[in-house]
Image (cartoon, rainbow, N blue to C red):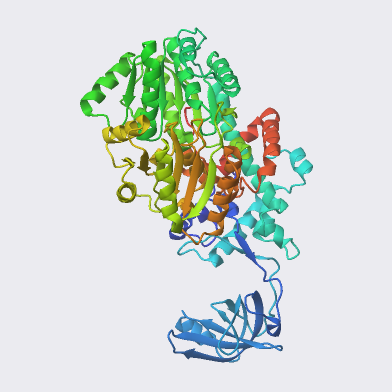
Amino acid sequence: MASNPPPLFELPVTALRGIGERQAEKLAQLDVRTVQDVLFHLPYRYEDRTRLLPIGTLRPGTEAMVAGTIEMAQVRFGRRRSLMAYVRDGSGGLWMRLFHFSGAQQSHLVKGVRVRCYGEVRAGPTDLEMVHPEYRVLRDDEEAAAEPCLTPVYAATQGVSQHTLRRISALALELMERRPPPELLPPEVLDAMGLPSLVEALHTLHRPPPDIGLQDLVERRHPAQQRLAFEELMAHQLILRSLRKQVQHQDAPVLAATQRHCAPLLEALPFDLTGAQQRVWEEIARDLGRPHPMHRLLQGDVGSGKTVVAVLTLLRAVENDCQAALMAPTELLAEQHWQTLEGWLAPLGIPASWLSGKVGTRARRTTLADIAAGRSRVVVGTHALFQEEVRFERLGAIVVDEQHRFGVHQRLALRRKGEGSGLRPHQLIMTATPIPRTLAMTAYADLDVSVLDELPAGRRPVETVAVPDSRRDDVIERIRAACAGGRQAYWVCTLVEESEALEAEAATDTAGRLATALPEVRVGLVHGRLGPADKQAAMADFKAGHSQLLVATTVIEVGVDVPRASLMIIENAERLGLAQLHQLRGRVGRGSTASSCVLLYKAPLSDIARERLAVMRETNDGFCIAQRDLELRGPGEVLGTRQTGLARLRVADLVRDAALLPRVEEAGTRLLDHHPERVAPLIRRWIGDGLHYADV
């Protein structure tokens, strides 16, 4: 009895005629390993070869397909040797020019031969020409027919030509017709949205008919593309929702409100919580009191008071005889948190530890022993907290700051640190980079979301101006006036090259020049190459007002809080993205004094740089800035897709396809409720083994 043939996602690409192991290895560079991968390796553009155009109607700068007879062929020698063939039809003539040609081509392209060729028409020295067109020599009895559909152009790699990709896509389409993949979207969803079936969509996109709306294809808005984008977004959302469901079935310590530490802290604070802080803390406290792990994202603009909420979360764990951990992505930010927490925890008699990659061997050994024995109730650190040798006695809560700097797998690894007690810790993930809702719906579907949408009383918006580098002397005078008035300033140096050594050198040179230009101003310096003690000393000096101007690299992007600093200069501002500019600007405006940010740029500006600087001048709203950043740079840059662990989207685009997301969410719920058996195949179809949330 014959067994069922394997599904297309299991069928290796070598099952297609003419594809051997060597070609399969080259195709693997394009992530094409199975027949299904061939079908999902979609064209990125199309060429219209469905009409033969008379040569006499052609204009330079257009692409066209023509057919005619070679009247003359010769090899010309100039700066570069080229094979020239003059092709005529009844309306006119043009030259085919080949710079790279073989002896076989030279013997084929001779007088009297009929050819059909496609390429870009250019103005040549004497007549129109096509340089390296795609061509075919026609047989004597063969008609110069146009193509029946638009010609797909695929992303290729060395050793894999367009001809090969078109051939194997044709073979894969034939195989799909005989063994269609299962339709995983509910028919009522497809009908309601007017979307085609999977088979129809794939056939349309690989071989579009001549009368298709080409503009819709170019803009990726054709129903066939939208159908695939819809299914892909659904797969990504479903995997995160299934993760969320798993979390809800795990056990976590119940962290009840004892008020043993939280109440004294709130009484000791020199300010009242904002309404937003109170609301968010109530949401978190409610989660912490449940027997399942909290998995919550806290979004708050720069200066909105996330740190207080984080500390309350840590204290709630300590109140319930658990340990708590706070993790930050950089040494400087982790150190800032450590100093803040020490000031708040010491009066409460809570022992805390600091752990980073730069802690010495002896101190590290002592710290690890204190954590393992439970003597350290709160641990603050960098990614060093992930390391296997770090063991907790009973970890109840984790706060991860600036989550987009860490990978999904990294923060999940930290969650597993609580497994020793048989319980999973609660987790609060914080970001000062607001994430547009459309992006959060897909990228953070596994998290509950809280938003701090209110700034503390007395905060004033930062006035922002863009100034060309030619007015540097005016900017220096502005610093002189600010410092003379008892205020402080930052000067941030940025480089294109992501090199700590080069950035440190640039910052050191800038500090020297500014110290010379401003002899009455004490200049501090902070960069990534400084040792922890030197960095901490420079920051402490600035915070205490001993230095008035701090020259720094972008290491001060987050976490630095100096209320008297009211002027920020960002050098080469045109090189930074909106999110980073907004983060840096957030270092000023933290007191009641009117604050300013100067974006110092080098002319001429690119269009996108001009737009970024304009957005910064127009608004201080982090959510508006995040939306514009998403539109300008795309989701991969905004989220840091490499770091988040999200698999790359192949068809969908979170900006272009944002309107689909509410329907995606509805359809995902329908699939989970009525067709749960389709969820795993849908995830496998789009994500495969590219994303592992194993054992979370």
How far from the left and from the top, in percent, is residue 108?
53, 85
Which picture quadrant has residue 171?
bottom right
Residue 382 seen in the current view = no
In the displayed structure image, the side of residue 289 where residue 215 appears, left or right:
right
**Considering only vertical position in the picture, is 503 above or below 160?**
above
Q: At 48% across and 13% down in the image, what residue appears? A: 253
Please state if 90 lies on the left or on the right of 37 as rendered: right
Percent position of residue 189, x then y = 74, 39
Q: Position of residue 115 (x, y in %)?
A: 62, 82
- In the picture, the quarter occupied by the N terminus is top right
Find the residue positioned furthest to the left.
362
Residue 305 in sight from this viewpoint: yes
Is 376 situated above or below 149?
Answer: above
- The tally of labels here is 0
Pinpoint residue 86: horizontal percent, then vertical percent. 59, 89
Q: Is residue 660 above or below residue 22?
A: above
Viewer-proximal residue, 207 or 238? 238
Depth order, front residue of 660/379: 379
Residue 96, placed above or below residue 632: below
Q: Residue at x 61, y 41 (%)?
A: 624
* Left or right: residue 202 compared with residue 403: right
Image position of 120 (left or right of 379): right
Q: Tell me what residue is drawn at x 62 percent, y 34 percent.
A: 679
